[in-house]
Image (spheres, rainbow, N blue to C red):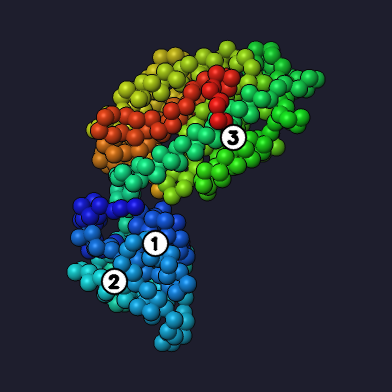
Amino acid sequence: MTVQPRVLTGVLRRAGADALLVVGTSSRDPDLLPFTGEARLDHCFVVARPDGARWLGYHSPIEREEAARSGLPLLDPATLRAGEPLPGGDRPGARLARSVGIALRAAKIRGRRIALGGRYPNGELTLALAGLRRQGFSFVSGHDALLRLRRPKAAAELAEMQVVAAGTAAAMRRVARVLVESEPARGTARRSTAARSRRNGGTALAELRWRGEALTVATLRREVAITFAAAGLEEPEGNLIAPGREGAVPHNTGDPASVLHAHESLIVDLFPRRRLFADCTRTFCVGEPPPELAAAHGAVLAALSLARKRARPGVRGFAIQEEVCRHFESLGHPTLLGRPGTTSGYVHGLGHGVGFEVHELPHFRAAGEDGDGAIERGDVFTLEPGLYDPERGWAVRLEDLCHLGARGLENLTPLPYDLDPRAWPLDGG
């Protein structure tokens, strides 16, 4: 992973800081990952100057080989005096203050105003910063600076995300294969409520079975996890596998015990990572979909096509969001633009940046600095329109992971969009 010096210089100047300090309990901290790459360390920190010079500090000699994998100049435990007793006793935050103070002086920072980032326990960090202030340092938030530092995806970052996106696509194809291999169980059709019957045009919902057992959300999660493990991916943020009414609330993760049914929508939203994340959503339906679900799927697919055509350098994400809202409203669906606070129809934003975290810059919000909300070359972001009806119990969301490169928009998750999993090519699934 590389941090471009010109980007570092720009974000520190914008933050009014003389250096960047990123402190984490792990090198997997998303603020540290752009610097530490594949190195796996416990408590560590990075100091970076505006000219691009940077150092990695670590506290345990047993991590020396992992620290070397970062490729950064190292501030080792001996340099940081990690094993030496503290004057006045080992107080919370005192060791961190001493090691960071040594690092900042070793880096020969011209000023003493430091942009601070990383995820570290607030109590200990607060005490450490108090000690560093007594040494003459002052601190400003480095959160926005790090978001902007992480935003450009160089060739290495893009290649990493393509690998993760390929693993995501494999898991989605695995879900499709399981659905193809499932079948409605005889004698399990039920119309437990009038609402269930109404939302399926009077069609009773039969439970799906796979390999002799009821097909549940937990079963699909297991198959996804196996696929990801084979690809070397992890799911630190979990996933969303949500049938019917559960999927009609967009961030409902899905009850593991829920049994899937024929003629019911199924939202599958996967966002694994290796070092960087990917993100992709598809909607399935086993058997003939209810007419309103089929119509909503067509409307969402058209909205995704519209968004892809509008995604060009310099265009604000929210401007595309507004066009998608107008598209849905023309078809009679409520949106947040025309009906703020609605929980039916189009109820969320169109997309977000993806990278070292699932949600990064660029944003697609109305508020915020224009530069953070305008799409730029090199950005990786999602486009994910959707429609939801919690009363009738169906949902549709289609999400692609996109890279805006020199040749235009590239879909990093080029999967089918069909509701019917039988329409998916399943070779290798």
Q: Earlier in the sequence, mark 3 or mark 2?
A: 2
Q: Amino acid at mark 1?
A: Arg
Q: Earlier in the sequence, mark 1 or mark 2?
A: 1
* Cα–Cα span, label 3 and label 1: 37 Å
Q: Is residue 148 left or right of residue 87?
A: left
**Percent position of residue 296, x then y:** 51, 18
Label 1's element?
A: helix
**Percent position of residue 407, x then y:** 26, 29
Q: Which residue, given by chain and number where applicable, does mark 3 sit on? A: 241
Q: Which mark is residue 104?
A: 2
Q: Are marks 3 and 1 in contact (CB under 8 Å)?
A: no
Q: Which residue, given by chain and number where applicable, does mark 1 sit on? A: 69
Quarter containing the C terminus: top right
**Percent position of residue 265, x then y:** 59, 24
Label 3's element?
A: strand
- Label 3 Cα crowd, 10 Å radius (few <14 / some 14-19 / many 20+): many
Q: Residue at x 66, y 38 (%)?
A: 218
